[in-house]
Amino acid sequence: MESTFYNHCTECKWAADKNDHMTTELAERAIEHAIETGHDIESEAGDSLGDRSGDP
C-alpha cells in the first residue's frame, strides 16, 4: 500500500491529505485551520487518515 502525506490537527478531528489536495492547497488549509482555531497542526506520512474528516 502506498503511503500518503497528510496534515492533521492535534486538538480536533480536522485533517487533509495530499490525495485530495495539491501540496500548496494542503499547506494553506492547515494554516487557515491553525489561525481560525488556534490549534496545532502536525504533518505526517502514513497509510491513511483513519476516521479523521476534513472539517473542524
Image (cartoon, grey):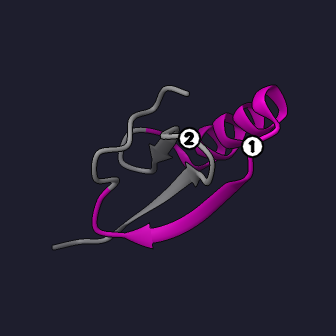
Residue 8 location (% of width, % of height): 55, 51
Q: Secondary structure at mark 1?
A: loop
Say which mark, if any, is on residue 12: 2
Q: Which residue is mark 1?
A: 39
Residue 31 location (% of width, % of height): 76, 40
Q: Tell which residue pokes out farthest to the left in this image.
A: 1
The kind of residue on which mark 2 rests is Cys
Question: From mark 1 to mark 2, how far is it between C-alphas?
Answer: 8 Å
Q: Nearer the viewer, residue 22 or 52?
A: 52
Left of 41 or right of it: where is 55?
Answer: left
Q: Quadrant of the N terminus?
A: bottom left
Magenta range is 21-48
Crowd tier of the residue under label 2, counting other residues whose Cα lies within 10 Å: few below 14, some 14–19, many 20 or above:
some
Residue 54 location (% of width, % of height): 45, 32
Q: Secondary structure at mark 2?
A: loop
The kind of residue on which mark 1 rests is His
Give the residue at x 52% y 68%: 44
